[in-house]
Amino acid sequence: MSLETVPSPLTTTPTPEVSRPVLTRVWQGPAGEARWVRPSLLGLLTATAFLYLWGLGSSGWANSFYSAAAQAGLESWQALFFGSSDAANSITVDKPPAALWVMGLSVRAFGLSSWAILVPQALMGVASVGLLYGTVRRAVGSAGAGLIAGAVLALTPVAALMFRFNNPDALLVLLMVGAAAATLRAIEATWTPATTRLAARWLALAGALLGLAFLTKMLQAFLVVPGFFLGYFLLSGKGYSYGKRVRDLVVSGLVVLVSAGWWVATVALWPASDRPYIGGSQHNSILELIFSYNGLGRLSGNETGSVVGGATAGGNWGATGWLRMLGSDVGGQVGWLLPAACLLLVAGLWLARRERLAGATAALVIWGCWLLVTAATFSYMQGIFHPYYTVALAPAIGAIVGIGTVLLWRRRAHYPAALTMGAAVAVATVTSFILLGRTPDFVPWLRWVVVLLGLGTASMLAVVRRLPRVACTTVAGLALAVVVAGPAAYTLSTAATSHGGSIPSAGPAVTGSFGPGGGLAHGGPGGGFPRGGPLGTPPGGVRAGTGGTFGGPPGGFPTGTGPTRGTGFPRGGPTVGGGGLLDGSTPSAALTKLLEADAGRYTWVAATVGSNNASGYQLATQLPVMPIGGFNGSDPSPTLAQFKGLVATGRVHYFIAARSGGGFAPSDSTSMSISRWVASTFTPTTVGGITLYDLSGAAK
């Protein structure tokens, strides 16, 4: 079966039954299809690029934690390789460096700027949408399915957030979508004797991409592996023996090991004295970072070195449970089509197997396992969890919605399929109505339009077989528009808002608290991260990462510089102040000039507790600033004795006191010991509202 025989999803001709579709041509189709497919794809990619690129510079440095590391990579190849926070290589970020390699190479090519850091993220978003389109189209033989999948991904609020931000998640999503596409091509290759030799190569490519994904965000990349394994092992061609399948899977696993392990082995074997400290670990160990702080600790909540941890009831990161993905903190990020996608997954698998559509079956198994395993992990993990992690669900939701919609549409002459379509639209409509109700001041009329039109089109879809052809097409188009109206509105709000800090959030403010399925509450118990009002303007509050304190150790975690539009800068520009755990500092011109004076005499122009606090000073001066204790201020880097030695040899010029004394680190931590030693040994001075100590001066 080639694409020439596949009808448009909007035609009335039912799909013929086939035993093994091998879709060898992606861009060719029937004459009627060719007239709209390419313009539609071009329109989708152009609109996505506009959405992700427009006003991108308003977010400034976005997550200054990673922007400072990119600046360090501009100055030092060693810092770029290890993912160091500063060019003098004192400590790394608490993630592997693949995403930093992209940003670092960009700033090396185009100079250090917000655009050089953020544009690659937006382009990765456009590439992800295009790749998802091609993968879904090939699997189901329908350009319509690909367009729906790509549009759902592009209009998911958390996707718009992450593809306009410089966290590692943009690269992670692109690599995982690429790995899924390669796995599906490998399965397809096993269906035809002439192409079976290509199966192992495609699967090896999938392994290489997963290895790079591991070097982007470690073990999270492997949440998609169960689906890849099951799809290849169970759905390869009948003539392709199980021995060959196991062989190919083993080879692909070895490719994963090599593509991810070469960097891990290099870091592990490199003499510790000649490389930066491994941020996020307590023993300067890359393996500890992989399997503890960024690994099993995320599941159990026992994360050594985390400022907030422990698998307590409800957890410091919100209550766990199967409703978490629809909770007040997460639902508006990604949950809009999640229940409908689950329904379409079941219906799509039943139809695909009944009609022996091998391509659609394989795709639904892979995307379905991706969705279920990832959603279950996020729902029940008791360690550090942020709502923006859920961007990893967006490609799977888009693919399942695209495939399931088209399979049902092709069978719309049959009452069960038509009824299922109507049910899916109704479920999506009710979900949107609930989620929009959590932001009553944000376009308040939208939820009523959605529920009225949504339930109306849902009832019409249930009897669509009785409608004229033109009416069928109109109802289908209206249904698609209604179900994406809510997430599209949130996405536009996200794109119109600048974001900064370490925990950005998509869409307008959400009224909610800890509860079943809830994540971090906005203003709920424990001092959850507040978020702003519609379009990011907080009504008497601040957005995530820019103010307030997080419930935890005494004194809270000092964050931010005051109310802002989004989470980075206020409407009138950045305010001046010290940083904290979750956002970067914004030093005054006087303080920046002071740090730059005689900078050539020192390895670090300053040191301060916490990587985010250090990042703003480093970006302002473009000179190394030592982040004592790493991201959380809790890593034992440097030790008190090591810091005293650096001061004695004149390698550190100033010590900048963190706001509230850097109270986000434990009182018995190395960073607090250093802070107390500096305060008791040197004389403080204040510049631009910031307290600092001249370590080159005489002791008290």
Image: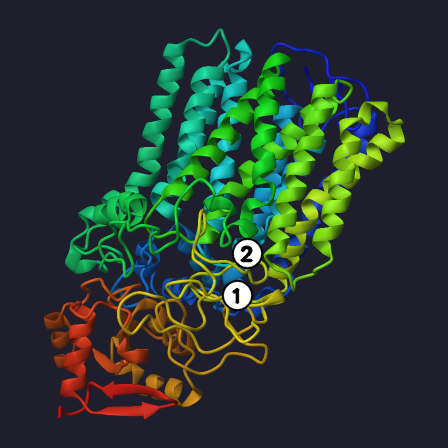
Pointers 1 and 2 in contact (C-beta within 8 Å)? yes
Q: Which residue is mark 2?
A: 161
Please, is residue 194 above or below residue 230 in the view? above
Q: Position of residue 240 (x, y in %)?
A: 46, 10
Quarter location, residue 609: bottom left
In the picture provided, is 573 more to the left or to the right than 374? Answer: right
The residue positioned 61% from the left and 24% from the top of the image is 348
* Closest to the observer, 242 or 78: 242
Report which quarter residue 83 is drawn in.
bottom left
Q: Is residue 182 visible?
A: no
The residue nearer to you, when weighing 570 against 69, is 570
Where does the N terminus fall, quadrant-wise?
top right
| Amino acid at the residue labelled 2 | Leu
Say if 57 sits above or below 693 in the image.
above
Residue 252 in view here: yes
Q: Amino acid at mark 1?
A: His
User: Could you tell which of marks 1 and 2 lies nearer the N-terminus?
Assistant: 2
Residue found at the very far top of the displayed protein = 239
* In-image side of 93 versus 333 (left or right): left
Q: Which residue is mark 1?
A: 499
Tag 2, which secondary structure? helix
Placement of the C terminus among the 4 image quadrants: bottom left
| Residue drawn 27% across the image and 64% down it | 630
Q: Position of residue 526 (x, y in %)?
A: 37, 63
